[in-house]
Amino acid sequence: MSGDRPIYERTDGQMFAAAAAAVARGDDLDEQLAELLGLAAEYLGANQGATYILDADHDALELAVTYGIDGEAHEAADSVSAASNSHDPLADVVRSRRPLEVDNAAHVAVLRTATTALLLPLVVRRDGIEISLGVMALGFAGPLPTPDALTGAEPLADLAAVAVERALALSIGSERAEWFDRLAYTDPLTGLANRRTLDRALELEVARAGRQGVPLSIAIFELDRFSDIQKAGGNSASDEALRRVAQILAQSVRLVDTIARYGNEQFVLVAPGPDGLVVTERLVRGIAALPPIEGMAISVSAGMASFPLDARTPEELMAIAEKAMQSARQAGGDRVVAIPAE
């Protein structure tokens, strides 16, 4: 049974101009969806409403915004799980991508206190294929509006779909930018800072230590018998050794420290303050406790240099730490050398 379209103050042109402005000028998705839902409710005379967004990764419809719905109903229907198989009318509309008139709104969880309901899919077209992004649900205290009024409300749902698609595109773009940014500053195998990040951190820490007159330690770690591990187990074994060492390094350093992958089998620690030797020795012990790979124990040779005792520039500190590390290797590895051999 259908009723008459309610009378409201705004003309059709004013109504849809407000809807277009909400999408074109808004920068917050929830605010845009709330505005569009409110306009749709005003246009049709609905006393309740809700907009769900499809979370394709989790196969669920997530409640985004509501209109005229109390907190209890909101909490009880905040999502529809297993949307691809659910018999909930909201999920049916997402799958069919077609509007649905519901004579008994009790079947729609979020609109159970309404009498009738209209469910409008949020659909966009990509490469000629219709894609469901969610659903706009409107509840009425009485009969549904006239068919003409229902058809006139569909552009409001289309605008909501455009807003959702734009927000998703921006989110994906932001995630990609963040991913590329991580690639620029981190080592992909170990997840530690890369050489570029290390150079910048070392430069800043040396400058800071010079200004404040405080000590700073640099330690270079090199895996012992790395080539033997690689020969015995191939690249998969050597990569696993690097990942295990990197995990110990990342878990054991302090928040003020910087740990980075420096070379193929080398890592560098930048440790502000007077405790660099203590931190380095703890790291060497932690690595030595790792389980063997290809029957070979994992250990590192570590060499240290201190600012300002040993040197005052990043380049000099790294050179001295490298010499000290070579001394640790020549002594059998699995140890820290703080004073380079002459």
Image (tube, rainbow, N blue to C red):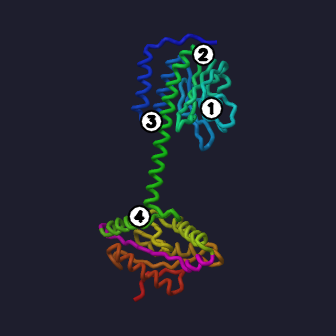
- Amino acid residing under circle 2: Leu
Q: Secondary structure at mark 3?
A: loop
Q: Earlier in the sequence, mark 1 or mark 4?
A: 1
Q: Residue furthest front?
A: 128
Picture residue at 65% right of the left edge, 36% below the top: 83
> Where's the N terminus, which quadrant?
top right
Query: Above or below — where is 194 with respect to 8?
Result: below
Residue under pointer 4: 197
Specify the amino acid type for callout 4. Answer: Thr
Gap between marks 1 and 3 measured at Cα = 23 Å
In the rendered view, does 314 fall on the left or right side of 245?
left
Q: In the image, what residue type sits under mark 1?
A: Ala
Q: Which residues are magenta?
A: 211-232
Seen at 57% across and 15% down, the residue is 147
**CB atoms of marks 2 and 4 within 8 Å:** no
User: In this image, 60 relative to 168: left or right?
Assistant: right
Q: Residues within 10 Å of mark 4 (few under 14, many from 20)?
A: some
Residue ID at (52%, 72%): 283
Tag 1: Cα neighbours inside 10 Å, few (<14), some, or many (≥20)? Answer: some
Q: Which mark is residue 28?
A: 3
Q: Which residue is mark 1?
A: 77
